[in-house]
Amino acid sequence: MSITQNGISTRSVHSGADPESHTGSVVAPIFQTSTFMMDTPGQTRAGFDYARTGTPNRSDLEQVLCELENASFAAAVNSGTSAEVAVFSALLGPGDEIIIPRDIYGGTYRLLKNEYERWGISIRTVDLTDTEALAAAISAKTAIVWVETPSNPGLDIVDIAETAKLAHAANAILAVDSTFATPILQRPIELGADVVIHSTTKFINGHSDVIGGAVLAGDGSTCPRAAEVVERLESYLTSVGLGIAPFDAWLTRRGIKTLPVRMAKHCENAQAVAEWLESRPEIDEVYYPGLSSHPGHEVAKKQMSGFGGVVSFRTDTEARALSLVKSTKLITLAESLGGVESLIDHPATMTHLAVADCELSVSPTFIRLSLGIEDIADILADLESALAAAAQTPDGVSSDAEALGAEVPIADPSPSTLQHPVATV
């Protein structure tokens, strides 16, 4: 069912959701099969022949993602990292350069550094919140400008429309990781992005029970190289087979039905927590695009309809940060984000060790908080209790890192390191 003229909440519920043709089931069944019957050689019944190249559940998910993002192409894959692999492998070649932001998902950096740099791909880090810095850095070698906005975990905001102009002027492709925003809050293709990726594991699925990703592309109206981009992505994905499994696709499609109402609550809770943390003397700095103090606040207001469900902040010492994340009760200490339950993460000991020794290392005083949809009074009470426990922690480096299962990497305590950390989940 194509209902592109309807509102985004209606599309979230109904896109691709025709009642099943044989039984009239309102909810699509799970097509748990590896292959599809043909009536005559080469003649498929509904365009499906082998599950590696496509399934009805994957097709339903891709249709709704296209309609939410206003994209012309979507591929639902088995993880957010697989979405990145598809983009890098299809669109980069030896001698190409990729420009990445100073605050980037650590898994992306690890993937590029460990797997693509040895193929002759050069990686250049630029402060993409500064369009003048990008204009000075971009060159004829630049094949992709890779943007995260909001970024993980520092919540930098990049002006997508202005970045698209600079990328396209250099004949480069603009790829935007919009995982933290989802298409409910931000649609990069409408702003000029050529490619959008999501870790659908996070807010899009929203229930912490499935791993998935998506790659989307626009058409020629905003993306001058759209036909080439789509052709190369389709060719790579058909050859390699990164598609999401039927049950995972079904779970993700079910999650999308409530995405608009969930994102509204995530944003509401995150705004309240950010304002509350900003008023606390125990907290050195709060990062949230919905705060007027955030340097990207005005850009976020221009290109987003809400500021997202993640808040990051810094304490004064590593020991207090470790004590705080261990002391929450309602809020779960865990990697990942975007679920209906609130999660707290200490990147320096949990998620970013792959980049501990590089320029993108994270401060051990930094905490990332993914706000769920619980009652805000309960979330704040839990944080109040955890802050009280952290206040009793002596100054200095804590031995609690061992209890969290990792050695603490000591980051360069420069302002840039403290303000722009990197996480891997």
Image (cartoon, rainbow, N blue to C red):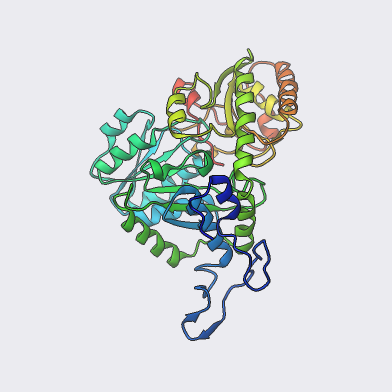
Question: Quick one: quadrant of the N terminus?
Answer: bottom right
| Residue sitting nearer the eye, 93 or 86 | 86
Q: Position of residue 34 (x, y in %)?
A: 59, 73
**350 above or below 69?**
above
Residue at the front extreme of this rendering: 5
Q: Position of residue 269 (x, y in %)?
A: 64, 29
Location of residue 360 by image quarter = top left
| Residue sitting nearer the eye, 380 or 140 | 380
Specify whether residue 420 is in view. yes
Location of residue 31 by image quarter = bottom right
Residue at the top extreme of this rendering: 281
Location of residue 189 by image quarter = top left
**397 above or below 149?**
above
Q: Which residue is drawn at 72% across and 21% down?
A: 384
Count the marks: how many?
0
Specify whether residue 336 is in view. no
Q: Which residue is drawn at 61% across and 53% down?
A: 252
Q: Where is residue 312 in the image (x, y as percent from the top left)?
A: 57, 28
Q: Residue at x 53, y 52 (%)?
A: 213
Residue at the left extreme of this rendering: 140
Q: Which residue is drawn at 46% across and 82% down?
A: 42
78 lies left or right of 19: left
Question: Quick one: quadrant of the C terminus?
Answer: top right
60 lies left or right of 379: left
**267 above or below 254?**
above
229 lies left or right of 330: left
Q: Position of residue 354 (x, y in %)?
A: 51, 40
